[in-house]
Amino acid sequence: MRLRPLLFAVMLSACASQGPVSRPTFFTPPAAAVAPSTPAEDYGTAHPFLLVDSAPDGRWLLACQAREDTNGDGRIETVLGFHGNIVGDALRPYLFLEPGEGIRIDEVLAVAPTGRFLVLVRDTTLWLLDVETREEKVLASDVTPDTTSPHPPIRASFSRDGLRLLYLRPEGGRPVSVVRDLLQGTERVLDAGRGLLGQALLDPSGQWAVFDVVEDTNSDGKESWPREDTTLAPATCRGPVISSSHFGWEGDTPVRRYRRLGGGALLQGDDILQPMGEGMLRRAPDRSIFLEHADGRHEVWVPSSCNGTLVYADAAHEQVLVACEAQPDLGLLELHGARVHEPVGWRMFLPFSDRYIRFPGRDGRLLSLLVPSEREPSNAVDTVIDLERRTVRVVPFGWVVASLGAHALLQESVEPAEPVGRRGGRLWLWNVGTGFPPNVLSESTDSGLLWAGDTVLVMGKRINLRTGKVLGDASDGALALDIRGRVLRPSPTAVKEPGSSAQSGPVRWEPALKTH
């Protein structure tokens, strides 16, 4: 996830006490602040540093640091393992609202898309921070952070407009789901039905609550949220993952339920596909797909003759992409909605899997999809569907790494000139709307992609992807990008320990452009 801008500047106490406090915990009044012990521009301390996320305008960071000799070997160092695991001293999460040593926290559960609100756990307390008004709200007490799960269940989420929050809080030893109006400050509990509520999230529209609930499906006499048997490291302060293995699940099997925030029955069943704005996409017994409106009206979008599998729901354009079953292993791709019924002209592998969706566009206009080749159906080709124009184009080079509006960035592998050289890549900018041949932007051995608003940094180039304009060259080694034309890099004072593979802190923001 990306964290949105925070429009404030605050001073924090250098004390990161984990005990009960009677004064503000996060937004300490400037008059009470203590001068930081680190240089004015630096975030963090001179210890192993793992960036988790940053605000697009660079006002705050989330990072993990190892600041204590937790394994008792007399030194502080961290080695990153293949499965994202940490060998050596333990990394702990910190929230930086300004340069300095930051505030030690336990877990971040959610950040509003607008950037105004954050939900996090600290000292077994669930906090809601309003960074615009500098208010701190305790949402729940006796909250146990989940620092051991490779994929922690979702316990807080915001609507796309950032005006509603759905979160779990303990009541009587069991979690309940609470929806909060963030402007009014009002709350109400939503009934998720019988069973143990393990996960709750808001549909991005903010009109539906989605619940994952377990009952005693394995008949062991208790309700247990499933636990994954995997080599993947816990999500909290996890390092880069090179490989991992999955060996199944233990515990009960969840069922998914839906409740419209505006009122109505709790929905559950195999006929439910997914929310679509204020309505719900459902499947009829005759295999047609219809939209059930809030007033109960049924509007058939996909006819029964299609026998369609839902591939992608495009709420912005009120349409769905489906694969109509033409033969056992291939389906015809079609777009359907209240006012659209068009064939796409390509086929899809059946049974459909999410792995065939290569890259959904950041704003939902372009959808990169892996489909069978027209000449050799056993082979796959990369395509891009323009959901606004309802056109399909084959990716001419490489694969899509990012898209926004009508523009897509393509990356192509380039073999090294020398036998022992490092494989590089070639970066292309493609206007899918016009379909003109893409322009080559860069050749580099750099990898990784950084976003900030409409701007990306990839392979040494900073690009406004909305306009398709190259803003300039960027120097190597960036950890993050912001919308002010800066990149986050290790501070000149940062020195990596000889035995540590993790980057060392502190870090600071610097101009992104290369100097020649």
Image (spheres, helix red, strand yellow):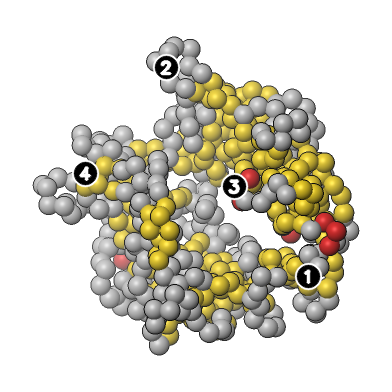
Secondary structure state at the residue bearing disc 2:
loop
Amino acid type of the residue that numbered disc 1 sits on in the rendered structure: Ala
**Residue at the spot 89% in from the left edge and 58% down from the top edge:** 339
Q: Amino acid at mark 2?
A: Gly
Q: Is residue 279 above or below residue 1?
A: below
Q: Decide: is 144 above or below 466.
A: below
Q: Is residue 132 visible?
A: no
Looking at the image, is mark 1 or mark 2 nearer the viewer? 1
Sequence-first tag of 4 and 2: 4
Q: CA distance from mark 1 to mark 2?
A: 58 Å
The local crowd at label 3, few if under 14, some if 14 to 19, many if 20 or more residues have their Cα within 10 Å, is few
Work out which residue is located at the far top of the displayed protein and give it: 418
Name the residue rendered at 11%, 47% in the picture.
Answer: 74
Label 2 neighbourhood size at 10 Å, few (<14), some (14-19), many (20+)? few
- Numbered mark located on residue 77 in the image: 4
Q: Nearer the viewer, mark 4 or mark 1?
A: 1
Disc 3 target residue: 355
